[in-house]
Amino acid sequence: MKNISIYILYLLFALYSTTGQAQSVTDEICRIEDGRLIFKLNPHWDAKERRIIAQVYALDSALIAQAFQADSVLMYNNEKWYVNKTLHKYIELSKVMTSESDFAFNKYNNEWIVPQVEPIMLQTESLMKYGINEFKDPASFSYTNGLAHFYLPGYKNAQKIYLSGSFNAWRTQDLLMQKTDDGWIVSVKMLPGKAFYKYIVDGQWILDPENKLEEPDNNHVVNSVVYIPNYTFRHAGNLKSKKVAVSGNFNNWHRKGIPMQKTSQGWELPIYLKDGTYTYKFVVDKNWILDSGNPLKRTDADGNENSVLEIGEKYFFHVKSFAYANQVILTGSFNNWITNELMMHKTDSGWVLPYVLASGNYEYKFIVDGRWSVDSLNPHTIGFEEVTNSVLTVEPNYTFELEGYDAAKKVIVSGSFNGWNPTGYTMTRQGNKWVIKLHLDKGKHRYKFIVDGEWIQDPTNPVYDTNQYNTYDSVLWIEQ
């Protein structure tokens, strides 16, 4: 088990953010003391950072997620883990070190060698679940009926001011602003999402002085950022409250929540939310309450009730087995492996649960009367032995195919899109080809196939790059 391909070192590549707002996985994540294996887990890691750590150290991402929820002792796959909360809210997860269960670690001169994780710059754009604007004066931007209204105060001596941004391909003379008594205005038809922009004042490019959100692009040029909202949280009443906020799974249930704005009738928060299923509550002067204006609610396995918001098309999880089970819970990377949230409904044909997911690749499992199980009807997996998860792709936009290799027992595609994980994604045999459909983000991707443990280039793809091991990786580009 300890002889794993050197390609796991690809996890140490520096992946630079398209927005420049990159997060770094710190060092000192893992250490060995007195025969104990100890992990220092950061609660601020996002889903991708947790996944990379799981791959480097051969930890199940579900185990990492449970560590943040456990009190002191955690049983996972018949192993006892100890959980200790340290200063700054870090979590120390530890167990007795054994050579049989820890294949990511090797001994040299009778000393355990800990894999080192250099700072990893992660792409945060595709992981973004929500966005809110931060203007000094709320009147500087508004969005109504599909129109985004930009207002730039001052600049009374300017002759011409244009608005330019990602929404008009950065053209410089399309959006001429109109001069008013106290500033300049322009309205633009825009769709919900994230946009970058600047003002051009008499030929000079400037950031929006009223906007607190700024990000550098790929060329390290800083631009102003605006989120075009697709939903508004509203809470009526409580006008005498000092603070009303909203918190949910989109902001990791932050205890303070996102502050809402006071109106004449209550409180509201315009927000951009990526397609997905969101559970949330309002926080009214530290009291957590349901959204009385939203009839959609969900009760978890512990009896806790939360309001539910669904944005996008529903995907139906359906499992035909476990007919004699009393309870089946769905959990996965899409809900940070929470183990008590998504109870499935029993029907005559099995267990079902409708759930809205954004486009992407997800890992998941079922918890059947307390026991973890992969989806037996899904041939696509990632992981090894007991640390195996089923893989679901929503809105695939690329098909990997490898022709031939009839005698192969297992074929995997791995690359920059899954941290060069040597255990997945598994492909299926269709005719004379091995096939899998995945969703890939826009941009450049490196990859290889793994045929019964042997890494090979894509024989049908003439595009390749040299890697740090003086071998070659196949390369593909996703345009949209």
Image (cartoon, rainbow, N blue to C red):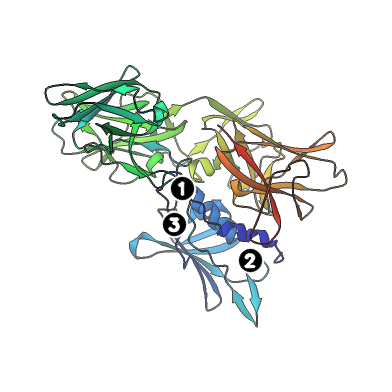
| Image location (x, y in percent) of residue 78 | 62, 60
The answer to which of 72 and 461 lies nearer the viewer is: 461
Give above or below for 49 relative to 96.
above
First in sequence: mark 3 vs mark 2: 3
Closer to the camera: disc 3 or disc 1? 1
Looking at this rendering, what residue extends furthest in the bottom direction? 109
Give the total number of marks visible in the rendering: 3
- Does the CB distance between marks 3 and 1 fall below 8 Å? no
Q: Quadrant of residue 265?
A: top left
According to the picture, the residue beneath numbered tag 2 turns out to be: 102
Q: Position of residue 47 (x, y in %)?
A: 49, 48
Q: CA distance from mark 1 to mark 2?
A: 32 Å
> What crowding class fits label 2: few (fewer than 14 Cα within 10 Å), some (14-19), or many (20 or more)?
some
Which dot marks residue 24?
3
**Amino acid under label 1?**
Ser
The spot of residue 412 in percent (x, y) is 72, 47
